[in-house]
Image (tube, rainbow, N blue to C red):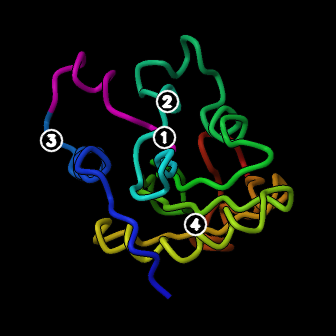
Amino acid sequence: MASGVQVADEVCRIFYDMKVRKCSTPEEIKKRKKAVIFCLSKDKKSIIVEEGKEILVGDIGVTVHDPFKQFVEMLPEKDCRYALYDASFETKESRKEELMFFLWAPELAPLKSKMIYASSKDAIKKKFQGIKHECQANGPEDLNRACIAEKLGGSLIVAFEGSPV
């Protein structure tokens, strides 16, 4: 069931910037987004970037020590959201970075919000071509490192965001 919700151009631009890693100067790398949270506009007609809800690569180690923990803490306790997270992980053979798409629908969110976000998910996913990993989380317990490692590759994953799994 489609909701008719539109995806704002800025959301698409952020996805493209996160997906395409150009050879960048150190200053440009610091401005690259590690995580971004998206919400519905007040009129519920478009998916927009939630103001102030992002983590920049340049913040890691400066104001952000555990980017994934900070990301989880940015999600609201009583409402739904979409998010992109640039996950860094290691297998026995190599280190990788891949984008993850999240639908956050906590138990305490109003039923109407859950329905709108669920029915609008296809609209945003169509704009996010090439996402390999998707996660629907209904509470913080769905966002622990072991659960995320499972989504990224199961037993092949030995570390997530620099910490052993």
Percent coordinates x, y for residue 11 in the rendering: 32, 49
Percent coordinates x, y for residue 83 in the rendering: 52, 52
Mark 4 sits on what residue?
A: 117
SS under mark 4: helix
SS under mark 2: strand
Say which residue appears at 22% left-offset and 23% top-offset. Answer: 28
Residue 142 lies in the magenta-colored region: no
For the residues marked 3 and 4, what is the alpha-carbon distance in whole angstroms? Answer: 32 Å
N-term mark: 2 or 3: 3
Q: In the image, which is nearer the foreground, mark 4 or mark 2?
A: 4
Amino acid type, residue under disc 1 in the picture = Ala
SS under mark 1: strand
Decide if residue 60 is on the left or right side of residue 24: right
For the residues marked 2 and 3, what is the alpha-carbon distance in whole angstroms? Answer: 19 Å
Mark 2 sits on what residue?
A: 55
Q: Badge 3: how crowded within 10 Å, few (<14), some, or many (20+)? A: few
Amino acid type, residue under disc 2 in the picture = Ile
N-term mark: 4 or 2: 2
N-term mark: 3 or 4: 3
Mark 3 sits on what residue?
A: 22
- Placement of the C terminus among the 4 image quadrants: bottom right
Q: Please say if the residues under marks 2 and 1 sit with CB atoms less than 8 Å apart.
A: yes
Amino acid type, residue under disc 4 in the picture = Tyr
Q: Badge 2: how crowded within 10 Å, few (<14), some, or many (20+)? A: many
Q: Please say if the residues under marks 1 and 3 sit with CB atoms less than 8 Å apart.
A: no
SS under mark 3: loop
Q: Which residues lie in the magenta part?
A: 24-37
> Taking 156 as reference, is 110 above or below it?
above
For the residues marked 1 and 3, what is the alpha-carbon distance in whole angstroms? Answer: 18 Å
